[in-house]
Image: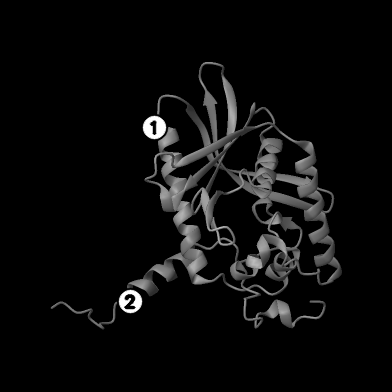
Amino acid sequence: MMKMAPGTVDFTEIFDEYLEAKREDRDRQIGVYYPSEISFPCLRSLFLRYKHPEPPKKTLMRRFYKGDLWHNVMQTILGENRRVTLVEKEKSVRVDVGGFSLHGRLDALIMEPQRQQKYVVEIKTIEAFKYLNHGSGQYQPVPLPKEEHLAQLMFYLKCVGDAEGGLLLYIQKNRFFDEEPFKWFTVKFDGDIYDRMVERAAELHGFLVDGRLPPPEPQHWNGKVCGYCPYGDETGNGLCRKLKGW
């Protein structure tokens, strides 16, 4: 019978150290914000990421890396298929707004050959397209597209300028072998969504510059947001709940 060897090689530690080395959020600067985060449902969590940096939970880093792998796969496929032309991928973009700036990196910019129209592609992975409603005991569709993903896409459309529109692509990573592993939405630039995202960034900037603690927003995602946050947890022992103003 084979047994696990207790030797000196720990593959979990090797993997987690690799993810830690790849982190891009180490050196945050007040005045530099990211649309992928600005729409995060809790302003206090964003504030604490700048004022009290904490590494994300290892389990969350692994989950994000799984999403990164799907991004890489889709970018490769877009670059090798014959239906569309991959113009650019992982393009860094920036918009200066008053006393701060918004930075991002779009997943892909493609060209539809027949009509010579460009589209910004934003790739998102979710667990599945349906979730179990514990109240009814029935599976229900996940509401898509999500507002925070639309806000991020509006930022990229604003930066590109000459794109016909955006394609918001969802991949259900835990149910990929189902008959329909993808869902996608074609969207036009919406100035109202973009403006709301900028206003939220301005609100965060004001709290950070003044050193004022934002109120918590745990009501988002039915409170589940705290489970993804390094400053709060369901037991109430996180830094967030110990701060004045909860």
Cα distance in 3D space between marks 2 and 1: 37 Å
Picture coordinates of residue 173 (x, y %)? 44, 51
- Give the answer, above or below, for where 174 lies relative to 236: above
Q: Which residue in the structure is indicated by mark 1?
A: 80
| Quadrant showing the C terminus | bottom right
Point 77% across, 54% down: residue: 201
Point 37% across, 72% down: residue: 12
Q: Which colour scheme is used?
A: one colour
In the rendered view, does 217 fall on the left or right side of 28? right
Lower sequence index among marks 2 and 1: 2
Q: Which element type, helix, strand or loop, lies under badge 1?
A: helix
Point 44% across, 56% down: residue: 66
In the rendered view, does 17 fall on the left or right side of 185? left
Picture coordinates of residue 72 (x, y %)? 44, 46
Local crowd size for mark 2, using a 10 Å CA cut-off: few (<14), some (14–19), many (≥20): few
Residue 236 is drawn in which quadrant?
A: bottom right
Residue 78 seen: yes
In-front residue for pair 211/227: 227
Picture coordinates of residue 136 (x, y %)? 57, 57
Tell me the amino acid under the disc marked 2.
Asp
